[in-house]
Image (cartoon, grey):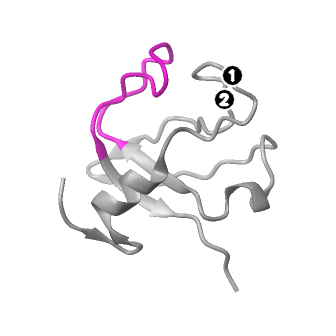
Amino acid sequence: MSGTSCTGNIEDEFANAKTHFNPTKCPHPFHVGDLPPLIENNGYAYMSVLINKFKIKDIIGRVVIIHDMPDDFTTQPSGNSGTKIACGKIEKGF
């Protein structure tokens, strides 16, 4: 995959993302870094998640990655969710 994102080069962000955020070493889909599926509609998607699995300070500097296939909720470590197609780095705001 090539191109750029608002946070820089996509390949760099994917490479820097490393593995799922999983400080408690739980299996997929129960580790802290697992978020609910993102549902798209005609190429658009919106998600709002309210969870108490982590604190904001725990995820600053981490990368959110979107895959092109649905999560099977079984395969380790990412649910056989396909190719990484988009990402964004979580940065501290104002």
Task: Tell whether label 2 touches label 1 (CB within 8 Å).
Answer: yes
Q: Is residue 9 left or right of residue 13?
A: left
Residue at image coords 34%, 54%: 86
Q: Nearer the viewer, residue 49 or 25?
A: 25
Q: Is residue 77 above or below residue 16?
A: above
Q: Is residue 50 left or right of residue 11?
A: right
> Vertically, is 79 above or below 74?
below
- Say which quarter of the image contains residue 27: top right
Task: Write down the residue under mark 1.
Answer: 26
Kindly identify the residue that appears in the image at 60 percent across and 64 percent down. Answer: 61
Q: Is residue 45 left or right of residue 55?
A: left
Q: Which residues are magenta?
A: 67-84
Badge 1 crowding class, 10 Å Cα cut-off, few under 14, some 14 to 19, many 20 or more, is: few
Magenta span includes 74: yes
View extreme (top): residue: 74
Secondary structure mostly taken by the magenta-highlighted segment of the chain: loop
Let me know if residue 45 appears in the view: no
Q: Earlier in the sequence, mark 1 or mark 2?
A: 1
Residue 1 % position (x, y): 18, 52
**SS for callout 2:** loop
Q: Residues within 10 Å of mark 2 (few under 14, many from 20)?
A: some
Reading the image, the residue beneath label 2 is 31
Amino acid at the residue labelled 1: Cys
The picture places residue 53, in percent across and down from the top left corner, at 78, 40
Element on which disc 1 rests: loop
Of 17 and 73, the residue lying toward us = 17
Q: Residue 94's x, y, as percent?
A: 70, 86
Amino acid type for the residue under numbered disc 2: His
Is 52 part of what is drawn in magenta? no
